Image (cartoon, helix red, strand yellow):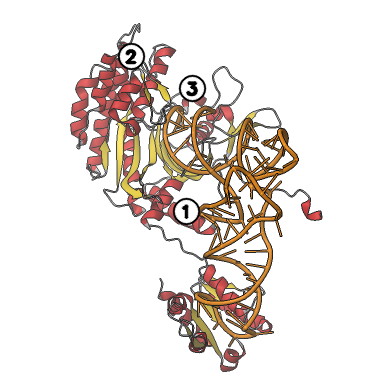
Amino acid sequence: MSDKIRRTEARRLRGFRDLSGEVVSARERMIARIRSVYERYGFAPLETPALEYVECLGKFLPESDQPDAGIFSFRDEDEAWVALRYDLTAPLSRYVAMNINELPLPFRRYQVGPVWRVEKPGPGRFREFYQFDFDSVGTGSMLADAEACMIMAETLETLGIRRGDYVIRVNNRKVLNGVLERVLCGSAGAACSEGAAGPGGTAGAADASLALNVLRCIDKLDKVGLPGVEQLLGKGRKDESGAFIPGAGLPPEQIRIVLDYLGIRATFRAALIGDLAPLVEASEVGRQGLDELRQIDAALSAGGFDEDRVVFDSTVVRGLEYYTGPVFEGALTFEIKDEDGQPRQFGSVFGGGRYDDLVKRFLGREIPATGASIGVDRLLSALQYLRKIESSASVAPVLVTRLDKSLTGEYQKLVAELRAAGINAELYVGTQNIGKQFQYASRTGKIACIVMGSDELARGEVSIKDLRLGDELSKEVGEDRKKWLEQQPAQASAPRGQMIEAVRGVLGRYA
RNA sequence: GCCGGGGUAGCUCAGUUGGUUAGAGCGUCUGACUGUGGAUCAGAAGGCCGAGGGUUCGAGUCCCUCCUCCGGUACCA
C-alpha cells in the first residue's frame, strides 16, 4: 500500500511551455539571424532584469494600490510591488532614465528575452514568450522611424520570407488623432475648440475615453469588417456566438467621418498622404502627422524601400497605450492551412512605433524614442511552416558506439579525435547492447555511428555506419534479415588513421 | 473575464437504459536476434475514467463545484 501515498503531481502553469532541444536551437538560430540585421544597423545589446518595480512598468490602476491585472506581480520583502516585465520597452525607458547623463544619444540598443503576461492562452499565445526589440532613444527624427521600417523588412527577408509574402504597414497616431478631433468635436455636448480633443489634448476624461473607444473599434477592422466597425461605433454589435458588444454610441454623422477615413486606401504612399489631407488638414496634429509621413516616405524611397515592402495604411492602430507618432507593423500576408484544413493567417509578427512620452514619466522632460518588437515565437512557427528554419535533430552528428565495453578507453580516444577535428561527437554512455545503441543514435538524430569491435581493432580499422542511408535501405529488406545483417550496405570500414576523412565524407552527404 | 463544447492508457478513440475485473489500434518496453536500426512473430508494462463533493444498493455513465483543453468574444503594453 506504500504505493498509495500521495505523490506530487507533475504539472505546469497554464500558458507556459516546455521547449524541446530542437525548438530551442531553431529559435536560437533565428535569433542569431535577427541579431545580425540589428547589428548591421548599429544597434548594440542591452540586458535588463526580468523583474521591475510595478510603477516603473507603468502599471498601477488609477486610485489603486493594486497592480493592474494582466501582469504577474507580488510584494517583495519591503512590501513594494514587484512584477515580471510584460514587454521590453518599459524597462528600456527605465534604463535610459537612470543613465541619461552617461548615454550618448541617440541611444540604440536591441534586447531579446522572455516577457510575461497574464492573458488567456490560445494557439500561438502564451503567458511567457520571447520578444526581440530594437529601439532608438533620444531622437525625434523621422529618419529613425523610417529606418525601423527598413530593419523590419530586412529582418523578415533575412529570415527567408520573400518579398510579397510580408508587408510593413505604417500609419501615424497623429493622423488618427486629427480624425478623432473632428469626431469628438461633433459629439453630443462636447464643447470643442481647435486642437482640444484627443489623447494629449486638453479635453475631458470622457472624451479621452471615447477617443480610445473609437481607436479600439478601428483596430477591429480586420476582424469585423467595415460594417462591423460601423455597428461598434454606433449602437453595438452581436457576434456569431450571440454575445452583444455595446458600441461607442456615436451619432451617424460622426461614424461617417471614421468610415470615410477608413475607406481611404492607396497603393502608393504619396497618394495616401494626398487623399488623407482633406480629412485632417483642419487639425494641427493631423497636419503634423501627415508631414511626418511625408518625411518617412522620402527616407524610405531614398533608401530604396518601395511600396512592395513598406506601405502606408490608415487603418493601422497598434494598441492604445503609449504610441505618440508613427506606428508600424510587419505582417505575413500568405495563408496557410492548419491541421483541419482551415485557412489561417499568421498576421502581424512585428510591431512598433514612436513613444515620445515614455521616458518623460521618470525625468519630466521629453526623450523621444521609436522602435519595434518582433514576436519571436509566432514568427518561429511561421518559419517552421515555410521550412525556412531547419530543425536539425542532433547537436552532435556522430555517435561512437561501445560494442565491447572493455574497449571503452579506445572509444574515448576516438571521440576525442573527432572533437579535436571539430566534429561534435557523442560517446554512448548508456549500458545497452549495440542494437539499442543504433536505435538511440537513430532517435537522437545522429548521422553516423562509429563501430569498433575486436575485429576492427585487430585490422586497425573502424566501421562507419551511415544511419540515414541505412534507414532508406532498410525499407527494402523485407523479411530476409540474415542477408541484410551480412551485407550491411550502409556501413563501410576505414583505416583508423583515416577515420576523420571518412566521417567527413558521410557527413558531407547530408550537409 | 464572459458564452459554448470537450477531458477514459504516452497518442487517437470505443465503452449499452447506471450493473461483475474499463477495452482496441498505434506507440513504448522485453524476447526470438548477447556484432547491427527496419519488417515479422511472441510476450509485458502502462488507467485516482481531469479533481473534489453529491444522488444511488451500485457512478467512467446522473447532479453540483473547481481545474484544464478547444472554439467564440472581451482585453491586449
Using the rendered image, report if marks 1 and 2 lie on a common chain. yes
Q: CA distance from mark 1 to mark 2?
A: 46 Å
Q: What residue does disc 2 label?
A: A184
Name which residue type carries label 2.
Leu
**Quarter of the rendering containing residue A321:** top left
Labels 3 and 1: the sequence-earlier one: 1
Seen in the image, is B22 located left or right of residue A161? right
Q: What residue does disc 1 label?
A: A27
**Quarter of the rendering containing residue A409:** bottom right
The quarter of the image holding the C terminus of chain A is bottom left
Q: Is residue A59 visible?
A: yes
* Front-most of residues A304 and A367: A304
Q: CA distance from mark 2 to mark 3?
A: 29 Å
Vertical position of residue A287 compared to residue A336: above or below:
above
| Circle 1 Cα neighbour tier, 10 Å, few/some/many (<14 / 14–19 / ≥20) | many
Name which residue type carries label 3.
Gly
Chain containing mark 2: A
Labels 1 and 2: the sequence-earlier one: 1
Vertical position of residue A208 compared to residue B69: above or below:
above
Q: What residue does disc 3 label?
A: A364
